[in-house]
Image (tube, rainbow, N blue to C red):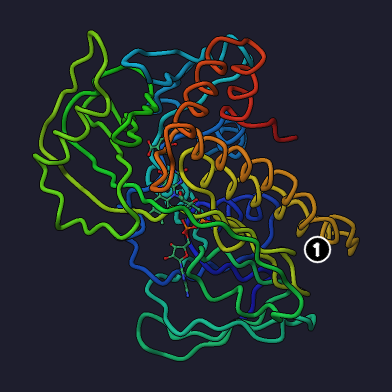
Amino acid sequence: MRTRVGIVGAGPAGLVLAHLLHLEGIDTVVLERRSREYVRRRTRAGVLEQSTVDLLRAAGVGARLDREGMPHHGLSLRFDRADHRIPLTDLTGRSITVYGQQEVVKDLIDAREAAGAPILFEVDDVAVHDATTDRPRITFTDADGVARTLVCDFVAGCDGFHGVTRSAFAPARSETYQRGYPFAWLGILARTPPSHHELIYAYSPRGFALHSMRSPEITRLYLQVPSDERIEDWSDDRIWDELALRLAADGFDLRSGPVLEKSITSMRSVVVEPMRHGRVLLAGDAAHIVPPTGAKGMNLAVADALVLSRALARYLSTRSTDLLDSYSDTCLRRVWRSEHFSWWMTSALHRFPDDDPFQQRLQLSQLRYTVSSVAAATSLAENYVGLPLDL
Ligand code: FAS
Ligand code: PHB
């Protein structure tokens, strides 16, 4: 098999990249380990930055997002049993949109299939070869069990943090920077209307909780748990009881309902530098991970895909390597800004196992300052809605 760009992974990074390159008339093949149904159903992120929404619209895949997405102009930090609203749009002129990651993935898969472009689902044994030659290859086993080789001009590693493309990078040629957190998030999807019209990030003596949503009928909720927690130890009733305690505030009632999904997600910050090795380039979680507290993960993946699509289009049309050569540095500026913001939100809002009353007073002082100072609230707001992309 032969293509201009072989893309490993059909998540937001791989699918946005494939779509943007298709718009440039560049032939790609997307290889995905999981089934079509699994990828379309997988619940993950929920918040789109303004730039992500603008990009999807400009790329012609924003119609359902415009119909079903929920624009939000503020969010609340909840502590001292009270809500403190951060008016995102008043402070920045930009907003966020709540629209599940799997909805973005469905829209992109639909667009690719409508264009008749290939996504090979349920592939296995993917391996990348000859990264530093001008003909990198991907070997894999297709869904029928047939061994295949895809010869490419470039390979895009969009296969997430547990993918294989990063292993094509010579260890001596890359650095990994990381930080773990001594807790995880237990997340649920529940069939009940949201209890508030906006997101609530709650700091409580019992630990962090987050109230989010997916639609007027579906609520998305998270609570901080120890990093080694087992989902089997959390009955639905126990989850609702703990959420009610952590989200408690005067005049607030948490609506409960049938739990449709529950899972535990670990928390870590990771960055791999550089994001390029020869003709293999990484995008999204394959290159970096952020704790979800800043709602950055998916948005970073989309931003990388935009930068990479331009770099590849420039080279394949003019043979100029300028954007390829600057790809990693261009992405890493945004990545590290998001890493810092996500670390800051995580540090401010979570209870750490070893924290003491002094640490808790520092956190409360920071939260009180953030919601009472226009400068501090604006700093949070402009990071949360996301720095503009030059579309
Ligand atoms: P993805 O992981 O989405 O996609 C990678 C794709 O590559 C997957 O489809 C995978 O099946 C495929 N793949 C992997 N190995 C392969 C191989 N060897 N061969 C072929 N294909 C392969 N972010 C938020 O902002 N908010 C959240 O609430 C949130 N919750 C999350 C919950 C979980 C459980 C996880 C894992 C992540 C969560 N994230 C969240 C982060 C998430 O949204 C990512 O940032 C986002 O999916 C990144 O997109 P991609 O880089 O495309 O990677
Ligand atoms: C979500 O709705 O899934 C969500 C929202 C905000 C976050 C993380 C997850 O910071």
Q: Position of residue 375 (x, y in %)?
A: 67, 14
- In the rendered image of this protein, does residue 81 appear above or below residue 267? above
Residue designated by label 1: 316
Name the quarter showing ligand 2: top left
Task: Determine the secondary structure under disc 1.
Answer: helix
- Which quadrant of the rendered structure holds the C terminus? top right
- In the image, is the residue at mark 1 within 8 Å of ligand 1 by its beta carbon? no
Name the residue: 61% across, 82% down: 128
Name the residue: 15% across, 58% down: 232
Q: Position of residue 28 (x, y in %)?
A: 61, 65
In-front residue for pair 53/242: 242
- In the rendered image of this protein, does residue 86 appear above or below residue 288? above
Q: Position of residue 189 (x, y in %)?
A: 23, 40
Quarter of the image for residue 237 reads top left
- The kind of residue tagged 1 is Leu
- Which quadrant of the rendered structure holds the N terminus? bottom right
In the image: residue 326, left or right of residue 74: right
In-front residue for pair 52/190: 190
In the image: residue 174, left or right of residue 361: right
